[in-house]
Image (cartoon, grey):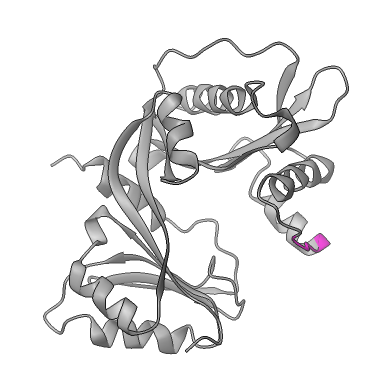
Amino acid sequence: MSLTVDQRFEEAMCDLWWLPEHTRVVSRPDVDYTSSSHTSRLFNAVMRVRESQGGYVSLVDEVMEVHRDRHSEWRLGAPSLHAPLETELANAGYVLRSEADAWTLSVDAPRPARPDGIDVTRIEDLDGLRDMFAVIDEAFGRDTERTDADLHEALAHSVGPNARCRRYVAYDSAGGEPLGAGSLNLFPQQGLGFLWGGSTRVSVRGRGVYSALTTTRLEVAKQLGLGEIGLFAVRSTSGPIVEKQGFTKHGPCRFWEHQMGSV
């Protein structure tokens, strides 16, 4: 039986090839989650939940204990959305951080021509990686501190012909300054190229930077034999953008978060 788009997205979330060594993976019939000594919710997250006869209280308690003193996140795509579970998460002090939807675009979909004056380049060195993070931090109003070790770890996943993460920066053709960034994770078993990190500097929005990055990543996905590109787009921000780009909407994904030290 073929899987639905939402099931394929959930499988992709559970394909954790990118995790660093400090992260532990728990995978059982009722749940998939990760935990780490690192406090970030990126490494302390639940990706898949199935109904169990024992209910959800014990599962939520288990995850809270494992994620104690860390930021904890439940990423509940459509196959894992169960109202009783969300009730237990709220009772345990989790907060609904954001609501998103799964969106896909066929690699054969027509695309507009790339705007003049924009060159999209694959990142293959630390300078390109620094440009990418500078764009992301500006676009999202962050000031994230990253060590050399962090940069080398990110780059290790992104270089070479077999890399399952492809990172891109859009540069101004004339001046060479970075305008936008976006990454593509490859999930061949699901036939899916997953878009993430899409961002454009505030001062150059409206020039077609995001569209150029999307087109480049779609072309790469097609060259690699994938059938679709897709992403989880937050309804209040990126949802309207990808709709204008011609993506098709599928099921929801809800992100529940418990802040470190909160009661």
Rendering coords of residue 12 (x, y %): 38, 50
**Does 39 appear in magenta?**
no
Judge left or right: residue 220 versus residue 122. left
Judge left or right: residue 123 versus residue 64. right
Tell me the residue at 49%/40% (across/down). 238
Rendering coords of residue 31 (x, y %): 29, 71
**One can see residue 168 in this view:** no
Magenta span dominant secondary structure: loop
Residue situated furthest right in the rendering? 175
Judge left or right: residue 124 versus residue 252. right
Tell me the residue at 58%/24% (across/down). 216
Of 109 and 252, nearer the camera is 252
Rendering coords of residue 176 (x, y %): 85, 26
Residue range of the region highlighted in magenta in the rendering: 144-148
Tell me the residue at 23%/56% (across/down). 79
Residue 54 versus residue 161 in the image, above or below: below
Rendering coords of residue 68 (x, y %): 50, 88
Residue 56 versus residue 185 in the image, above or below: below
Q: How many numbered marks are there?
A: 0
Q: Which picture quadrant has residue 202?
A: top right
**One can see residue 98 in this view:** yes
Residue 58 versus residue 241 in the image, above or below: below
Of 17 and 84, nearer the camera is 84
Quadrant where the N terminus is found in the figure: top left
Judge left or right: residue 139 versus residue 218. right
Tell me the residue at 65%/44% (across/down). 158
Residue 253 versus residue 237 in the image, above or below: below
